Image (cartoon, rainbow, N blue to C red):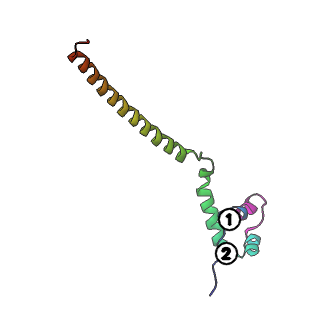
Amino acid sequence: MKKRRQFQAADKVIIIRQHLLEKKPISDICDEYNLKPTQFYQWQKIFFENGAAAFETKTSADQKQRQQKLSKLEEKIAHKDQVIAEIMEEHINLKKRNGLL
């Protein structure tokens, strides 16, 4: 039974790059790496479809985490403010009862 070869993403990019930048014919590339031309064209299609991702900032996931952390901290501050307001209200009521105000 033959074991399937699996190319890493970086290897696929190197293979596609040979054709696009070095102008190496697809037939030579397929012979060199023992690929079928359909496989090469499939990789090339995926490469071009996902090309925009290379230019996107990778901080979008980082920004989501920061935004979630920020909203949690804002909620925590709001809760603390509410607790402080309640404590101050009790403090003022105690002063009023004791005739200090």
User: Label 1 belongs to which residue?
Assistant: 12
Q: What's the amino acid at mark 2?
A: Lys
Residue shown at 69%/74% (left/top)? 35
Query: Considering depth in this image, is 30 or 85 the residue closer to the camera?
Result: 85
Which percent across, then down, holds residue 92?
27, 19
Residue shown at 70%/63% (left/top)? 16
Residue 97 lies left or right of residue 8; in this view the side is left
User: Label 2 belongs to which residue?
Assistant: 36
On whether residue 23 falls in the magenta region, the answer is: yes
Which percent across, then down, holds residue 5?
65, 76
Which percent across, then down, holds residue 40?
66, 68
Query: Considering depth in this image, is 98 or 26 the residue closer to the camera?
Result: 98
Query: Considering depth in this image, is 99 or 33 the residue closer to the camera?
Result: 99
Which percent across, then down, holds residue 51?
62, 53
Query: Considering depth in this image, is 7 or 43 the residue closer to the camera?
Result: 7
Magenta segment: 15-26
